[in-house]
Amino acid sequence: MINFFFKLRNYLKIFKTPDTQKGNIKSKNIHIDLSCETNHLGDTLIFTPLVFGLIDQKFNVTANDPYGLINKIFKIKKKPQRNSLKIGRSNKFANHKKLDFNINFYSMPNEPIAKGLFKKFLEESEYSNTIRRLKGLISELGDCQNLKPEITQGKFVIFAPEINSRKFGFYPSQKSTRTEIKKQILSMKKEGYKIILIGSSKDKYSEKFGTNMPVDYDLRGETKWHELIYLINHENFHMLITFDTFPYHLACILNAENMVFSRSWINQSEYFWIKGRFIPAFIDR
């Protein structure tokens, strides 16, 4: 119950003045701690420009990333070095004492979250160049080891509904957009595109999406993040259709065509502070 109210307080901070205070880094050793269950794969990706920027500035960076994404991109270790300054994100009150900087996405400035996070510790002038180079690093990790060759034969659209999104927060209400989504998928199908459905293994048993959808390949529970990189960078990739998900943030950072449905219980009113921070999370539109 304490954690619930603490999390609610973090969300309500968005109504106050954005946190633009510069983070004072007093150590050359930096540890990025994303081990809390608060952080999903998309949240982890949002930290990558900051990690890259810190490495550029000759900081000794380590990262506790349960997904292994940051460690694999930058080839850095998980275990923190001695006297490391700890930067992380957690809604659990008990974890805050372990962090020197606990990042609250909702109190960041009204701009893409990754940019606000980068600016908190580094110079803004370096951000655009960091994003451009980061795209190249991430692209190198794409592979098709477990993908059938016929999947990428012919133009295709990736559909990522992300059924198992969090229940509390600024996240999609899939039920309210099911008709719109299906209409868009049917439109793509009529234009001759193959439809590839991706998601978690749990999504495979959901009745919200997948049922009565004109899907050519159902890869839910079968696609790793590095295989998704390969698919998005493929010459036959046309578009990603999704919500505020990891695939969406990945498509943004790879500068890939995407259509994001964002109809949560609060951002239907298009509040500027939601659009500014989350759509997209990396680059101003």
Image (cartoon, helix red, strand yellow):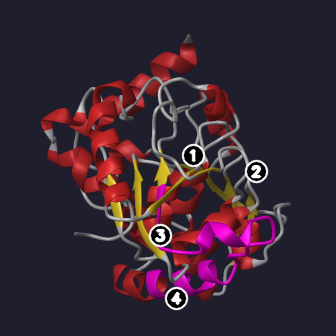
Which of these two is toward me, 163 or 208?
Answer: 208
Say which residue label 4 marks: 133
Which residue bears the numbered disc 1?
Answer: 89
| Front tag of 1 and 4 | 4
Give the Cα separation between the discs numbered 1 and 3: 15 Å
Left or right: 34 with respect to 275? right
Q: Earlier in the sequence, mark 1 or mark 3?
A: 1
Q: Is residue 26 magenta?
A: no
Q: Is residue 13 left or right of residue 139?
A: left
Give the label, 1 or 2, closer to the camera: 2
Residue position marked by numbered label 3 in the rendering: 121
Give the answer, above or below, for where 78 lies relative to 204. Answer: below
The answer to whether the residue labelled 1 contacts the one labelled 3, judged by CB atoms less than 8 Å apart, is no
Name the residue carrying label 2. Answer: 66
**Mark 1–mark 2 distance (CA, rounded to whole Å):** 13 Å
Q: Find residue 143 and report its image quarter.
A: bottom right
Label 4 to label 3: alpha-carbon separation:
19 Å
Q: Which residues are magenta?
A: 131-158
Of the two numbered discs 2 and 4 on the same chain, state the one appearing first in sequence: 2
Q: Badge 2: few (under 14), some or many (20 or more) residues near its Cα, within 10 Å?
A: some
Q: Nearer the viewer, mark 4 or mark 3?
A: 4
Res 215 visible: yes
Instruction: Give the residue type at disc 1.
Output: Arg
Please indicate whether residue 29 sits to the left or right of residue 38 in the image. right
Where disc 1 sits, the SS reads: loop
In 3D space, how far apart are the residues under numbered discs 2 and 4 (Cα atoms)?
A: 24 Å
- Check residue 141 for magenta coloring: yes
Q: Residues within 10 Å of mark 4 (few under 14, many from 20)?
A: few
Mark toward the viewer: 1 or 3 = 1
What residue lies at 61% left-to-right and 77% top-to-bottom?
138
Residue placed at 70% from the left, 75% from the top? 73
Q: Secondary structure at mark 2?
A: loop
